Amino acid sequence: MPAAGCQEPIRGVHGVVAATVRQERGRQVKAFVMKEIGRVGFMEKPDPQPGPGDAVVQTTRALICTSDSHTVQGGIGPRENLTLGHEAVGIVHAVGDEVKDFRPGDRVLVGAITPDWGDLASQNGYPSQSGAPLGGFKFANSKDGVFADYFHVNEADANLAKIPDAISDEMAVYCADMLSTGFMGAEKGNIPIGGTVAVLAQGPVGLMATAGARLRGAGLVIGVESVPDRQKLARMYGAGEIVDFTSEDVVERILDLTRGEGVDTAIEALGADVTFQTAVKITKPGGTVSVIGYFGEGEFVRIPRVEWGVGMADKTIATGLCPGGRLRMERLLRVLEAQLVDPSHMTTHEFRFDDMERAFEVSDKKLDDVVKVMITF
Amino acid sequence: MPAAGCQEPIRGVHGVVAATVRQERGRQVKAFVMKEIGRVGFMEKPDPQPGPGDAVVQTTRALICTSDSHTVQGGIGPRENLTLGHEAVGIVHAVGDEVKDFRPGDRVLVGAITPDWGDLASQNGYPSQSGAPLGGFKFANSKDGVFADYFHVNEADANLAKIPDAISDEMAVYCADMLSTGFMGAEKGNIPIGGTVAVLAQGPVGLMATAGARLRGAGLVIGVESVPDRQKLARMYGAGEIVDFTSEDVVERILDLTRGEGVDTAIEALGADVTFQTAVKITKPGGTVSVIGYFGEGEFVRIPRVEWGVGMADKTIATGLCPGGRLRMERLLRVLEAQLVDPSHMTTHEFRFDDMERAFEVSDKKLDDVVKVMITF
Amino acid sequence: MPAAGCQEPIRGVHGVVAATVRQERGRQVKAFVMKEIGRVGFMEKPDPQPGPGDAVVQTTRALICTSDSHTVQGGIGPRENLTLGHEAVGIVHAVGDEVKDFRPGDRVLVGAITPDWGDLASQNGYPSQSGAPLGGFKFANSKDGVFADYFHVNEADANLAKIPDAISDEMAVYCADMLSTGFMGAEKGNIPIGGTVAVLAQGPVGLMATAGARLRGAGLVIGVESVPDRQKLARMYGAGEIVDFTSEDVVERILDLTRGEGVDTAIEALGADVTFQTAVKITKPGGTVSVIGYFGEGEFVRIPRVEWGVGMADKTIATGLCPGGRLRMERLLRVLEAQLVDPSHMTTHEFRFDDMERAFEVSDKKLDDVVKVMITF
Amino acid sequence: MPAAGCQEPIRGVHGVVAATVRQERGRQVKAFVMKEIGRVGFMEKPDPQPGPGDAVVQTTRALICTSDSHTVQGGIGPRENLTLGHEAVGIVHAVGDEVKDFRPGDRVLVGAITPDWGDLASQNGYPSQSGAPLGGFKFANSKDGVFADYFHVNEADANLAKIPDAISDEMAVYCADMLSTGFMGAEKGNIPIGGTVAVLAQGPVGLMATAGARLRGAGLVIGVESVPDRQKLARMYGAGEIVDFTSEDVVERILDLTRGEGVDTAIEALGADVTFQTAVKITKPGGTVSVIGYFGEGEFVRIPRVEWGVGMADKTIATGLCPGGRLRMERLLRVLEAQLVDPSHMTTHEFRFDDMERAFEVSDKKLDDVVKVMITF
């Protein structure tokens, strides 16, 4: 996901952590952790053990996300020695007694969000909100994340997905968050076939929103981006027009591209007040602003009153958190199998897990035109 | 509707006005107009004539709306000698050659919004936005309104509805805007049967949102209101709990009433920044904020960032403008026929059209615990 | 639900039964079972035990359903000594170690459908289909039902709901199936406020569909029924018109009542080919046929081709199976709390559990104008 | 569209025909007509004239549809000297006084369906049903069609769309019916990104349903077809698997391809009872059968009861009629502009209008592996 969630520790965090790391069987795993706000590094941790319905996965590939940086900066509050990372694939190492569909040795994908499926929010159709607001987001939030040799997965039958032979780990790992979040932006945007879409910011999630808009049959996808490499990727993923906010007025230009009407759907993929305002302004009456950015700053996010139609223009503002779960992951893997999207173009850097500190620095400081950093275990 | 729309004159206003009033057959109608910003009064106007698909209706009952006051205060920009009013019923006086389903003498209801049905926004499912943002709102905005002996209706076959014998004019006139807007708040709020709903502000539109929430099967409707008479009406229309913002913390109280979860749906029926913020805060993850208030002030309407789930809590903010058209009006009349809602409890004052200046003052200055003022022609 | 489901034993049935009844701790429960096709009676069974996430409930009230008769007649295939019944309330007797929100002594409602919430069908939004088609329907199908002193509930935190003090057992028990299935008919029927609805057959589920149509704000609900007592109940639950198929042509009459247009929504609540055909015929183009009847006979259910608009009239045929789960049950209980519907009018007969054989006979043979038979434990 | 509609003459047909052909200015147009059931040929007809809101278009390209054959065979009842054809592009020749957005000389696309936009069915969201069931289908049904030098279009501003310079007439003409109907099959099928879809029959409309499934992001599209050329086209338009019903069991094979679950969406694109049954059988619980075929025969279309889940498997059967109107056409043209679909592969034959009799024979008798026949004027 673009970034993490709550300011407060999430309900049940201690119980979960306890369940996964308490046992002391001697074997230790190497983990890349947030030691405290602002400080990261390696440490040894006890080997995680699965509960009756859970699994432990041996990590093979992981991706670093902007939200890992947010977390380290204190975005979800203080954490001590919390293993980072939420985008990973691996090999099932162990499963609990009640797990039916997975066995050690299975090559699996794990969604960044691993919901409690029986929870009331899940029953209501919003599993990402299970347990608490954004409560499905457990990795590197309410329990240890995936930047470790092994990591724990709750409700394995519901939260793991087998990776088909035809799909490499390097491709599959993008489903965990990037495809799921980006595509959600398109899905919640209610795009009609042939509709017009603007995607504001072409970072990895915005790029996958661009691809997602194409997957829903958008007739025109406008990518808003100033970085040339990202503009190029945006075109590759389906943007028919690029608007560079450093050299032109975004609202004016997008209205021009749409006969003055505005777009059917504006996808906000940055998480900034000003971009959100632009999104509202460029959306036609009856259209949808679909938010996938993480809004990390300020007391308010501001809706421009007049362009919002003084609350009467039938504009909808939708939000959501990266859908997880086995069904979602299986569907995303099918998109890869059908070769509809190739996320590997976003991998600008690759590091061994041993070089994680350098890898994190590249991602964190956005060095060297980084888009996405892949870690090999 | 709660209030009017655009800051700018709407496309085509002059043409429309010309078409409806230019003819000079001698007969004059008496109209209650906004002479200029801040000034109202009677004047004589030429008798309106129907175009080929239009009708002219002789007014029998009308209601004054808060948005008439907004308009006079300049809310939609300057207007000169514009007839006010958008809520009326009457008798068909004349129809154009192409009108098929209505004849002079028919007792009819006219929606406050009279869309252009072939327009692209209408084809997109948003007729209230036809022609321009909020463009379906023509009366007392882009053409003369209904506070006159006679008024003009575009696309008569599509925008008129016959009033069944069993329903009085005094009841039917509430469908034009109050029921349509209020119920829309409930409909767009996506209320599940047995769901929890809060309606913020129990003015006439809020009261009809309360009734609308009941009509959709809400299990608990919480009315937020401080005025005793309105609290009483709220209970009558289905509020099971009343929260008085002058004596208790609205957010805290509503979270208490919902086990800390928040409501499935919050309906904002005031149009104020602070109420909107409350609506976002009291809505559960996965829930909907449904806006029916007119936001008349300030550059921005502000979303509280953290309670919005930093853009990730699956909270949806929906808006809309009073649905119009014959089908809608027929359905609302059926609600009255089935005696599901009795809007007449809201009529606190009645005046003859000749006393319109006093009537307007009562509504405008909210004198004498006014809820809704009815005018008889 | 109107009746049961699959012709084949459902996946996992043996495992589940084993888990719930195999243990032999000595205590026996009294159960009313289907001994084999066509034969019912009491028997002693081992006391059920909860798994880690499960509960055992001591039954206080139960209702007999038409589908219990279907099951006994072989509707879901042969069963041996299967405890019957799926509509019950009771007191929590025991819970497994992982149950968080329920404790022995809690007065609870259990949905007739108790889904596996992590299953792929549940993740897809269709928990009633979890595990297999209609797989959420476990009681008296893939495991023992509720006509026993004690019964077992899977995933207790997700499938139980506490009953508020203000609601009696006699009221709450109707939520398990009758309200949930009947209201689903209205919900899936996509009824607009003020819309027109016909409910075909006013048995208990049809009556609750009638009530459900009112809960969604239907403007006209037409009940099709010939039995006077049921006609009377239909009016009580909101039918504004009654059509008696024994004395008038249903299609003709309903078209008359709707200006020749047909209804927005037809709810089929019988499960018969001919009624289904009528439902298609009386539904307007763009309308919905919502099926809640159990279709127990014949190789085919037949759509009348021409009235279906030769496959082009934008008519939708929706189906579903009684939604279960804690959230649903809580919402239905809230409907009772708000006194929006009083299901107790349907209780025509009451028996002690000891008189279950006579009670079953009354329900099975539809003696004595029975609508619904309540059992007290 | 696959084929035409009603057995009965449609309301208003005589009025419309009168309006369009009554004037006798001397000029005659050449038209290819259905003289009576079973007989076609050329004839001269009076030059059509536009009403105030209408247009007359000079035809440049047209396509022959299977439904033209159905009509000639009597599928919509007897017609005398009715001009055939409903898929065309051309040049605006004349417009009525009230037409605002089109002028003579404009190159335009006309949807096969030209709704009355103010009608109650249109207000209800189903413009294809305006005026009567399937009433939006006017060409070659309730008024003269497009196989003529000039043809009449009602509500020009709402039913015409300008063709962008980049798109040839040969491409644009496919939007009128083929893309609109085929894509509707995908849209109404409620396909999730990465979902599984089967399209039963790969005629022109089925091929565009295949393309439409891809446009909505299906992960696996299974085309059911036996003709090698059509199988090849199906793969070109996005089918990842082909099932040949002449050599394998369709139900068994599709269940195999989907782990025994069935597809999320089955699109019936033939209009045959047996294919419809297959569609129900291969759809998973919670899935959708989306019907775009024209069902021309038999009293009933039959649902297989058990595989339908005895009416309880949450399977939805959706239907519809080719969406028309300017907005739809503009969106489809945008799909062509973005080069997402190239319909020209379906043009197997081209003829001059003078050779229409031979052209019709090729299409009618399915000679020479015809897929689609284009006519040049």
Image: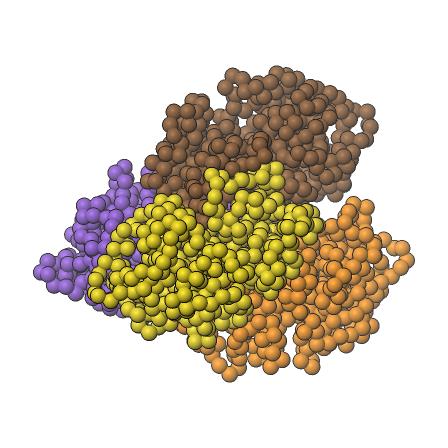
Chain colours: A yellow, B brown, C purple, D orange
Q: Kindly give the residue lying farthest to the right in the view shown.
A: D26
Q: Is residue A42 above or below residue C330?
A: below
For the residue pair D275 and C307, the one nearer the viewer reads as D275
- Which one is in front, A240 or B204? A240
Whole-percent x, y for residue B361 in the image: 60, 18
The residue lying at 62 percent from left, 80 percent from top is: D229
Is residue A41 visible in the rendered image? The answer is yes
Give the image location of residue A229, x and y in percent. 59, 61
Q: Is residue A195 left or right of residue B55?
A: left
Q: Locate residue A323, reporting x and y percent.
A: 43, 57
The residue sitting at 51% across, 59% down in the picture is A367
Q: Whole-percent x and y of residue B51?
A: 76, 38
Front residue (pair C262, B12): B12
Residue at the extreme bottom of the image, as rendered: D247
- How many discs appear? 0
Residue A237: quadrant of the picture: bottom right
